[in-house]
């Protein structure tokens, strides 16, 4: 019962105290005396300067009742405070608020759950009041700490525990609303506050999610559940907090999320982590998305030595964040994202290589498989993230990312790549090559350039084609698939999938446009490089069916997208050269590969003949295919690529009707107006500069065995001496005079010796200058005329020698090496452009 005073003493007490005392009944069960409460409210509104004293007196009574555990009077006092707070909005309310907050703090410090909930409810009501003027001295540090502690309540009674946690979450929500609307709202974003608020909210979201995962997929909560479910309430509060974050305090709100996920080991499995960052990305303002991505990348760097599954969990979270951010503002972090992901891709491959190389045999057998699979999860997550991010970028940024990734691909023998592979070894280098090309494949998917020069510039095409020279069928497949993504501008690749004889190409409804000038220029500049890589790619010993399918698709896409009349002739020459190589078999290919090349040629010539629609050409190709179907089905793709296909023992005894003949093709195309002179010239792949940097390879490996194949047929690098015997036209055949000039190592050494050359050059220059200064003009003119006539006569002799055969078989070129003497050939048959000087 409240303390009663005598009438004399009561009359001497201040009026505000008497009004306050009157609102408390003798029995607290009767509740607040409403009539007296109205008087107190009227008095407070009429004399606002008394609010401070009213609040202090109420606080004094409430503190005494709390200590004496008079819960009924405590409830009455808080109800009176709430009504006074809602009724008074004057300048004098500031001191009253201090008393009010002091009373709320007293309730929160008590150990009784009912009083804690009561104090929280009063604080929430206060938080919803908009004050006229800001408070420059008020701080909410105590309330942040206390409400956060209530969110982690561990009361033995589940119902009471849930009630306290809900009160704590609502209290945090009230603090956020009050401070964000305040002029001094920056104080709530300080790290010491965020480190308490954010983990408290995540703790409640996590606990309920674990319960839901045991029961089944959660249903959408109703309005009543939102007030009674701590997880739903915490999520709403978390969204509200992030929605109010600005540029300067975004990082302070996100970093505690990483600390909570690390402390509770929630990256593996990472369902809750993904859920949290989805909430973050959808709640923050779109222009701040790149801040979150930067924080995830920074955390990935900080946890780079953790287990593969933890890193994979972080990368998958990054994927979800990127997927949401890609629809809005990416910010300046595009290259940073790719650079960080590629760095971690290299680290993952390095860890995988170290696990395979190091350790004992027993431990390797036990752990290699699991570690390898875990690292593959990391690598696949990185590739998926790179691909998704790249595919959502605009074209101008995507082309830069393509160049960026291509610059990271290590190529044996070059130093142009920027990725450190010193610790990887051969196996790790091959693995990183595959991973990077897979990433590039994902980025180029769906890329549509108006001209092929934009999609395949020289700075990109040269390094892209370099891996196709390597003795690895998977790398060659990836390179071809990347090229298909960039070449296929009209979505025809799906129609060409699978190597086969197409009865009627018109049924495919191929989409194509007229070849533009830029594409024609591209083929003139880079066509031979493409032909060469297709030619050599067909002759690799480790080719599988997919390689032949991709090579066929490459030829078909070049025909559709880039072929004019000249390119068509070059492609047919290439196909005939492939057929000849399979028949002659200089590279000792297995019979399956030889038949695979023959099937590839048949499928492509069938396609191109129908594309250019030359009836005679189509008839010849159809006839050969028909004969093959009857006599040699293993030369057709439908048969050779089946599981069980009978292969011939040799190809030398086959009838020529089984082959596509150059003279028949030339005759058919010539009748339709094609320039077929070049068809009679056999296709020979041109050797391009393999090492653009001018440096020799660090390891002269078999990776470039195609260069060795060409050098065996063309190169004369090992020549020690060259003897040229030419019979002059003026000498009779019976008096043969042999003019032999021998070029030996000593002669070459003397020829390139530069000692004394400077002085001779100076003397020559001095004499020339002196002559032109002192000699008569007529003498100088006569001498110049005689030299011009001599040069004209020599040039005429050379042209006559190269365009007609010599009168005698003696006009031959003899090439002598240290091991053997090559067969002499007539001089007029020499193709001077093929002579390469190394």
Image: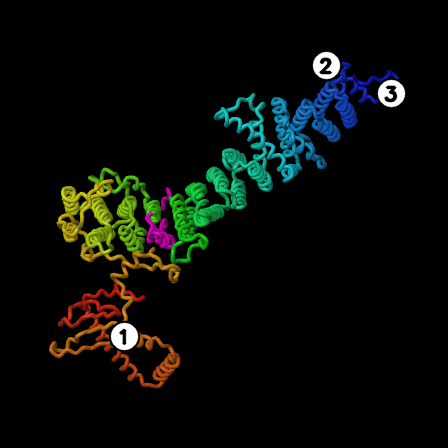
Q: Position of residue 287 (x, y in %)?
A: 52, 40
* In contact (CB < 8 Å): disc 3 and disc 1: no
Depth order, front residue of 173/82: 173
The part of the image, by quadrant, that contains residue 626 is top left
Extreme-front residue of the structure: 362
Closer mark to the observer between disc 3 and disc 1: 1
Please tell me whether mark 2 sits on a helix, a strand or a loop: helix
Give the secondary structure at mark 1.
Answer: loop
Q: Which mark is residue 743?
A: 1
Q: Residues within 10 Å of mark 3 (few under 14, many from 20)?
A: few
Q: Position of residue 414 (x, y in %)?
A: 39, 58
Q: CA distance from mark 2 to mark 3?
A: 29 Å
Residue 7 picture quarter: top right
**Residue 27 lies in the magenta-colored region:** no
Q: Secondary structure at mark 3?
A: helix
Q: Residue 23 placed where, x, y %?
A: 76, 18
Q: Disc number at residue 29? A: 2
Tag 2 or tag 1, which sits nearer the N-term? Answer: 2
If the image is split into quadrants, where does the N terminus sit?
A: top right
Colour pattern of the rendering: rainbow
**Magenta-tinted stretch:** 445-473
Q: Which residue is mark 3?
A: 12
């Amino acid at each position: 019962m409240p303390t009663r005073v005598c009438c004399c003493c009561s009359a001497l007490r201040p009026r505000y105290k008497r009004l306050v005392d009157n609102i408390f009944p003798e029995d607290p069960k009767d509740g607040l005396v409403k009539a007296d409460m109205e008087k107190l409210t009227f008095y407070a509104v009429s004399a606002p300067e008394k609010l401070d004293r009213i609040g202090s007196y109420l606080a004094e009574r409430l503190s005494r009742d709390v200590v004496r555990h008079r819960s009924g009077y405590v409830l009455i006092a808080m109800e009176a405070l709430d009504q006074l707070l809602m009724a008074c909005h004057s300048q004098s309310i500031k001191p009253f608020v201090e008393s009010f907050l002091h009373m709320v703090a007293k309730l929160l410090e008590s150990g009784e759950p009912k009083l804690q909930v009561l104090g929280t409810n009063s604080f929430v009501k206060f938080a919803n009041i908009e004050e006229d003027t800001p408070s420059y001295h008020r701080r909410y540090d105590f309330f942040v700490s206390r409400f956060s502690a209530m969110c982690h309540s561990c009361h033995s009674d589940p119902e009471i525990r849930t009630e306290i946690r809900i009160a704590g979450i609502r209290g945090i929500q009230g603090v956020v609303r009050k401070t964000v609307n305040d002029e001094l709202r920056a104080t709530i974003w300080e790290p010491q506050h965020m480190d308490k608020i954010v983990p408290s909210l995540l703790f409640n979201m996590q606990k309920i999610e674990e319960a839901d995962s045991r029961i089944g997929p959660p249903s959408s909560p109703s309005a009543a559940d939102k007030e009674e479910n701590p997880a739903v309430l915490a999520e709403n509060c978390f969204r509200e907090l992030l929605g109010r974050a600005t540029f300067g305090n975004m990082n302070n709100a996100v970093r505690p999320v990483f600390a909570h996920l690390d402390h509770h080991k929630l990256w593996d499995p990472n369902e809750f982590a993904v859920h949290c960052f989805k909430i973050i990305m959808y709640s923050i303002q779109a222009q701040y998305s790149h801040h979150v991505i930067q924080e995830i990348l920074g955390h990935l760097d900080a946890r780079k030595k953790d287990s593969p599954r933890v890193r994979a969990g972080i990368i998958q979270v990054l994927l979800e964040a990127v997927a949401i951010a890609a629809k809005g503002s990416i910010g300046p972090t595009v290259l940073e994202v790719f650079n960080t992901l590629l760095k971690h891709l290299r680290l993952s491959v390095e860890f995988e290589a170290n696990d395979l190389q190091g350790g004992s045999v027993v431990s390797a057998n036990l752990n290699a498989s699991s570690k390898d699979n875990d690292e593959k999860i990391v690598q696949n997550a990185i590739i998926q993230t790179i691909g998704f991010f790249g595919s959502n970028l605009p074209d101008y940024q995507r082309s830069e990312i393509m160049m960026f990734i291509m610059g990271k691909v290590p190529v044996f023998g070059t130093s142009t790549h920027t990725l450190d592979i010193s610790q990887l070894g051969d196996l790790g280098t091959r693995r990183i090559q595959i991973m990077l090309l897979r990433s590039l494949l994902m980025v180029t998917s769906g890329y549509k350039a108006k001209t092929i020069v934009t999609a395949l510039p020289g700075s990109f095409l040269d390094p892209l084609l370099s891996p196709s020279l390597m003795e690895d069928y998977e790398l060659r497949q990836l390179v071809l698939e990347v090229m298909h993504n960039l070449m296929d501008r009209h979505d025809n690749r799906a129609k060409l999938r699978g190597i086969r004889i197409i009865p009627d190409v018109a049924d495919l409804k191929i989409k194509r446009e007229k070849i533009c000038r830029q594409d024609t220029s591209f083929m003139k500049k880079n066509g031979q490089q493409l032909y060469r890589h297709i030619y050599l790619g067909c002759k690799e010993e480790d080719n599988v069916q997919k390689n032949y399918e991709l090579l066929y698709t490459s030829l078909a896409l070049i025909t559709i997208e880039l072929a004019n009349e000249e390119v068509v002739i070059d492609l047919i020459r290439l196909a005939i050269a492939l057929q000849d190589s399979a028949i002659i078999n200089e590279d000792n290919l297995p019979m399956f590969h030889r038949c695979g090349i023959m099937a590839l040629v048949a499928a492509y010539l069938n396609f191109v003949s129908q594309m250019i629609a030359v009836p005679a050409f189509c008839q010849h190709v159809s006839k050969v295919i028909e004969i093959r179907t009857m006599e040699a089905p293993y030369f057709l793709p439908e048969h050779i690529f089946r599981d069980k296909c009978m292969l011939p023992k040799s190809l030398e005894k086959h009838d020529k009707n089984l082959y596509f003949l150059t003279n028949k093709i030339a005759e058919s195309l010539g009748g339709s107006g094609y320039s077929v002179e070049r068809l009679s010239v056999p296709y020979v792949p041109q050797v391009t500069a393999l090492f653009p940097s001018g440096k020799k390879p660090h390891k002269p490996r078999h990776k470039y065995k195609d260069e060795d194949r060409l050098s065996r047929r063309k190169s004369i690098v090992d020549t020690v001496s060259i003897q040229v015997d030419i019979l002059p036209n003026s000498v009779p055949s019976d008096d043969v005079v042999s003019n032999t000039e021998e070029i030996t190592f000593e002669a070459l050494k003397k020829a390139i010796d530069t000692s004394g050359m400077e002085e001779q050059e100076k003397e020559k220059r001095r004499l020339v200058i002196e002559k032109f200064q002192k000699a008569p003009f007529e003498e100088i003119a006569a001498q110049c005329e005689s030299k011009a006539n001599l040069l004209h006569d020599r040039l005429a002799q050379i042209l006559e020698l190269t365009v007609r055969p010599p009168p005698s078989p003696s006009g031959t070129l003899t090439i002598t090496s240290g091991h053997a003497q090559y067969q002499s050939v007539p001089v007029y048959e020499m193709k001077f452009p093929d002579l390469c000087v190394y």
